Image: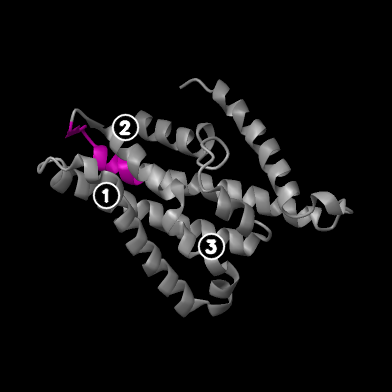
Amino acid sequence: MNVAQFLTIFISAVFLYNVILSRFLGLCSFVAISKETKPAMAMSLAVMFVTTMSSIITWFIYRFLLIPFGLTYLRTISFILVIATFVQFVEMVIRKISPPLYRFFGIYLPLITVNCAVLGVAVLNVDMFFINGRAITGSFYYSVFQGICVGLGYALAMLLMSGIRERLDLCNVPKSVKEFPLAFIIASIMSLSFMGFNGFKF
């Protein structure tokens, strides 16, 4: 393990290969929940929790169950089961702590289960930190940190988007581009701006 590797993971996950604006994963919740900052922040925290915890559990499952028994071909279905379990847990917690927020999320909270961003980080961890069926040195810590950083990248995109959309609510926007058309235009411009980080050399 070294600091440079952690720094590389942070810059890559948050800026260079942002899960939403560069990899284009998890767009359904990104467009639907980013109308206001508070729900966007709550969704970001929920996704960050799920990505971090699923990174931990999927690493153990892959390292101590799938690889030793030659079941690596089951990684997708096993990862989805882990993610679904944690999403149900998050859903129950939000329903208990904040019923209004739970009602606001509606169908999009259970959709974290099929949020490809969450599955994407679990698969990415396996592809990056396991070589020839063996975990590289520090792979567990790298996997957990990448789960956190992907959540941070998701939160960054959500908060930027929600801030822009809240400001645009005060503007006279043509009716033909309100709501989803305007959201996709904003997302496209944000994605283009994040491409500027590709010039980083580290």
- Residue 70 part of the magenta segment: no
**Residue 131 % position (x, y):** 22, 28
Tell me the residue at 33%/46% (across/down). 144
Q: Nearer the N terminus, badge 3 or badge 1?
A: 1
Q: Quadrant of residue 179?
A: bottom right
Q: Nearer the viewer, residue 132 or 157?
A: 132
Q: Nearer the N terminus, badge 2 or badge 3?
A: 3
Instruction: Give the foreground label among 3 and 1.
Output: 3
As drawn, the label of residue 58 is 1
As drawn, the label of residue 128 is 2
Q: Is residue 43 left or right of residue 171?
A: left
**Residue 34 % position (x, y):** 64, 56
The answer to whether residue 194 is above or below residue 172 is: above
Tell me the residue at 14%/46% (across/down). 64
Looking at the rendered structure, the kind of residue marked 1 is Thr
Q: Which residues are magenta?
A: 133-144
**Residue 130 % position (x, y):** 24, 33
Label 3 belongs to which residue? 108
Q: Nearer the N terminus, badge 2 or badge 1?
A: 1
Tell me the residue at 20%/49% (across/down). 61
Looking at the rendered structure, the kind of residue marked 2 is Met
Residues packed near mark 1 inside 10 Å, few (<14), some (14 to 19) or many (20 plus): many
Kind of element beneath mark 3? helix
